[in-house]
Structure formats: C-alpha cells, structure tokens
Amino acid sequence: MRIAIVGAGALGSLIGHGFCRAGQRVTLVDRVHRLAQIEALGGLVVQAPDGESSTAVPHLLAPDAATAGRHEVVFLATKSQDLPAAASAMGPLLGAETCVVTLQNGLPWWYFQRFDHPLAGRRLDSVDPDGVLERNIDSSRIVGCVAYPAAILRADGTVQHVEGQRFPVGELDGQERERTRQLVALFTAAGFKSRAIPDIRSELWLKALGALSLNPISALSRATLADICTFEPTRALVAEMMTEAKAIAESLGASFRHTVDERIEGARAVGHHKTSMLQDVEIGRPVELDALMLSVLELATLTGHRADAIRHVYACAALLNAGLAAAAG
C-alpha cells in the first residue's frame, strides 16, 4: 500500500514511523527544512514511552504533492490551520480511489457531510470559511480518525511518544467499508490500537472535550495536564467547559461513554505533559483555535446554546493567538 502523510510533525512522524516498520511504502510530504532534518537523522527517530528509541526510513521525502505522486491512502496530519494550503496543493496525491484520513483535533469541516441530520450538507464556516477544503477534498474520499496518542517533536527533529496507542476510524455515513477494515489492519500492524466505529462524530466530541478546554487553558497558564486537573479552580473551569460542549454535542445526536469527571481524570493520568497548543506557544507558533473552539461556538449558535465559559476562554486565547500571529509575521 502506498501511503502519503502530509505533515511530518509529532503525530505524522509517529504514525509514519510505525507504518515504515510494518513494511509499508511511506511518503512524507512536508516543508524542506523538516525533510532535511529527517534525512540528517537517517530517518524518523521515535522514542517510545519506555525510553527505547528506534529509526524507520520512509520510502520518499517529498517537498510537495507533485513530487510525491498518487497514493492509495493520504493521511492529513497537519495542524487544522494549515489544512487549506495542504488541500489546495494535494491534487497530485489523489487517484480515483484514494482515501483521505483526517487526524486533526477538534471538529472537522466535514462534520455535516454525509450525515443524516437536518443540517446535513452544511459547511462549518469557522473551519473552512472559503470552502477550500470542501472543494478540494470530496467527502466520499474521507474517513474520520481520532488520534489519541500524545507526542512531542523535539528541536533536534526526533519524536517522543509520551503515551497513547488508539486510532479509531469511521466512515462519515456510519457504514463499514473495506477501506475502513484496511485502515484498522494498517494501524494494528504498525503497533497501534484501532477499530472501525459506526459513530465517528461521537468519538470526535469525546476527544474534543479535552482539546477545547485543556489546550487553551494550558496555553494561557503554561501549565501541564496534571497541573490543570489538580488545581481546583482550573479543574472546575475545565468541567464547566466540557459540560457546555457535551450539551451541544448531545443536541446534535452525539453520545458519550465517559462522564466529564472521567474525562478529566483521564487527562490528569497523562501526567505533566504539555499540550500541543502549549508547545506551539513556547516556540512562538500561532495555535489552532478555529477547529478546537470556534467550531464549537458556531455549533452552539446553531443549536441555541450560550456556552459562556467556552466563549470567555476563547476570547483570551484568541488575543494570545493574535499576538503570536503578529510576532510571527
């Protein structure tokens, strides 16, 4: 199977490393400086949670989709704010049957596509305001995936896999197809845990509860997951934000297999891990707020929910992000 991974950051490198070690033909598509870093290291270097490091060599390092050519599966592993540029240029990767797997945090632009709901077909403007993603990636190609592993891309280009193994996948219309079974087998052979689920949107919401609350609070406070979840005032704020989001999700038909308290305890158990948003702040990179927070506020408006706690934290995080964007030019 020819696999292209667009975005060789922490997550893209982690799954690419696993797929390479499982014997797949993996192409990494990323900026020249990141590809040069991987080449200098002799491949993708990942340190496992037990401390052991290993190297896996991709089949091809490509600075653009045209160099990479067509693939059977394309994993979109960029940050959500980088998706429009990636989607606009990914045409050469796509054959007639190419499957596109989305790995981003938060709620995707395709949320209402191929969905039996009164809002079916609606685009989430907060995530895809100009329709670039919708025009360039046909919904029939998409398989949703929720990426649970936590990983860190170090300054030297190596990746630390902190914890987590799960990559549940699901079709937008809830059906199980041969391609979803193949994706489950692909992740499993690479040493991860995966299963095909009929309701990928509920799984997206389960992870989104943490992303929309813990990530911005960590970025604003510079605190780790354990710090946020054990300091009573921030734990209470996280619970309030999660409860607001849960009500929005349930009004859209989503269901949850964990309570808010269980979700917070799961985050606390990860320990003193810096969220991806905090990692971005520390290197001066603008953070992904639209998919994590603004999309939830858009859905709050559509469903008649106030979501005051989410709205207030978003205002503070958006101000932080504006400063980061200005500094980054």
Image (cartoon, grey):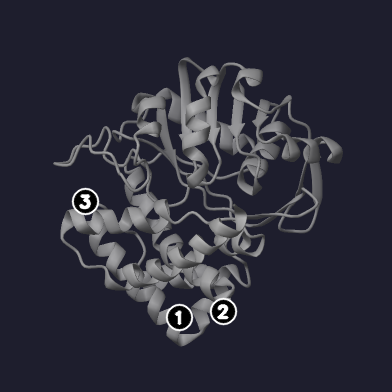
Q: Would you name the residue on which mark 1 appears?
A: 234
Q: Secondary structure at mark 1?
A: helix
The mark that comes first in sequence, 1 or 2, is: 2
Q: Nearer the viewer, mark 1 or mark 3?
A: 1
Question: Percent x, y for residue 105?
Answer: 46, 51
Q: In the figure, residue 303 lies in which quadrant?
A: bottom left
Relative to the observer, which residue lies in front, 120 or 267? Answer: 120
Q: Is residue 166 left or right of residue 177?
A: right
Q: Secondary structure at mark 2?
A: helix
**Whether label 1 touches label 2, CB < 8 Å:** yes
Q: Which mark is residue 253?
A: 3
Tell me which residue sits at (77%, 48%) in the image: 157
Relative to the observer, which residue lies in front, 4 or 323? Answer: 323
Question: Percent x, y for residue 224?
Answer: 59, 73
Give the residue type at disc 3.
Gly
Work out whether 184 lies above or below 10: above
Q: Would you name the residue on which mark 2 appears?
A: 227
Q: Is residue 168 left or right of residue 7?
A: left
Instruction: State the separation of the CA atoms marked 3 and 2.
Output: 33 Å
Give the residue type at disc 2.
Asp
Give the residue type at disc 1.
Thr
